Amino acid sequence: MKTVVICNKNMSKKYSGATRTIYEQIRFFYNANYKIYVVADTLNKKDVLDTQNEKISFIKTFYWPWQKRLRRRLRYSSSAEKFIQKIQPDITISHGDYPSADYFFTHNNVCLASERIHGIALSQDSEMYQTHVPIFKNKQYKKIIANSNIVKKDICQRFDIDENIVEVIYPSVNKEEFPTPTQIQIDTLKSNLDIDKDLLLVGLVTSGAFKKRNLKQYFDAIDLLPKELAEKCYFIFVGKDTVYPEAAASLQKNKYKHLIKHIPIIDEVSVLFYALDLFVLPARIEEFGRVVAEAMACSTPVITNQWVGASELLEGTSKECIYDGEDTLALAGMMEKVLLDKDLRDELARQNKASVEAISEENTYKILERVLT
């Protein structure tokens, strides 16, 4: 039996993009009859118990929480290297914390993110620079797997990497996680969230990091909507993060702030996606953006911008719902157009559900088989 080692320091958060991608890879290699080892500092015990069997082993490295984060990363990398040298696997995969793997999967483009979010180059003294940049510069990998063409283009140009070395594989969507709910389930969710079921529901759904996801522009665009339309809507933003000062100031002066509500991360996220009449993601940078793909899988109209990797999935009329990321007036105009036209929303919903089929797990497995085995 062939073996694969998958390295990722933090496996405690099942909802994180990297962790979800790793579980996709576990399912892929399991079906391909590999013995799978996952090396991590932190693990979610329930997920491990639900997943572990004779073909899947989770290897927990020794975790020193009192160390500085860069030291912890270096120590984790050393522990992963020792384990890999011991078992000599057929394939090694890194998700950012182990530099010498055969295949390096990118999830965050830290240099581009610093420029887009903060308007400055990433400091060479920062932990993220010292962790990520050497991996690209040392070129020890067989392949880099980028999660969008945005990422591929930037790292090839920034680090002078041959584009043939970089493969784009979008994170997949597991359709079983997004079954169509009943209208009763949707109405119950709205009732539990104290949302009038007769209002159009607009949402920015994310895990957090509101500054990266440009929450302020979302608020600013809402403020630009015509009064007669805005008062027929309810606007939510989902995530565990606190609202950063610039966004808080925008919300405070928003003339529709009584129609805007912050909702923490909820378990019924698939029902929430189906409940939305419009999903908006105005991120400053989103290397992929699973929430876009998940909204599409739930037949939800989507508006996003060219700095969101998942915008590459939008086809047909849905491509008209991509703006440049800077023009708040353009975002508000798109929101107004979609919210006023039920037939357009239905068309976008159909197109999005069909388009996202390209990254179903079944189709992603075919790409992983070509690239990794």
Image (cartoon, rainbow, N blue to C red):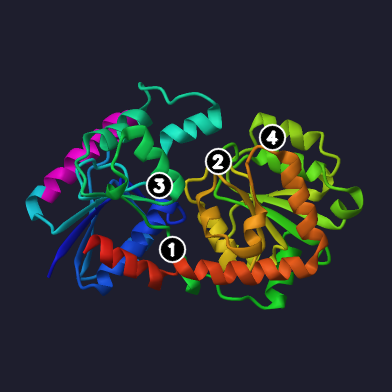
From the image, state whether disc 3 or disc 4 is nearer to you: 3
Q: Residue at x 64, y 72 (%)?
A: 350
From the image, state whether disc 1 or disc 2 is nearer to you: 1
Q: Is residue 111 above or below residue 314?
A: above
Instruction: Give the mark nearest the N terminus, 3 or 1.
Output: 3
Q: Position of residue 307 (x, y in %)?
A: 55, 44
Q: Residue at x 81, y 50 (%)?
A: 259
Q: Amino acid at mark 3?
A: His
Q: Which residue is mark 2?
A: 209
- Check residue 241 for magenta coloring: no
- Check residue 74 for magenta coloring: yes
Q: Amino acid at mark 2?
A: Ala
In the rendered view, does 145 fall on the left or right side of 331?
left
Q: Is residue 127 above or below residue 233?
A: above
Mark number, residue 172 = 1
Camera-side residue: 148 or 19? Answer: 148
Q: From mark 2 to mark 4, how far is it between C-alphas?
A: 12 Å
Q: From mark 2 to mark 3, how far is it between C-alphas?
A: 15 Å
Residue 254 in view here: yes
Q: Quadrant of residue 52?
A: bottom left
Instruction: Give the mark nearest the N terminus, 3 or 4.
Output: 3
Find out whether the residues at labels 1 and 4 contact each other: C-beta distance under 8 Å.
Answer: no
Q: From mark 1 to mark 4, how far is it between C-alphas?
A: 31 Å
Q: Which residue is mark 4?
A: 247
Q: Which residues are magenta?
A: 64-84
Mark number, residue 107 = 3
From the image, state whether disc 1 or disc 4 is nearer to you: 1
Q: Residues within 10 Å of mark 4 (few under 14, many from 20)?
A: some
Q: Residues within 10 Å of mark 2 (few under 14, many from 20)?
A: some
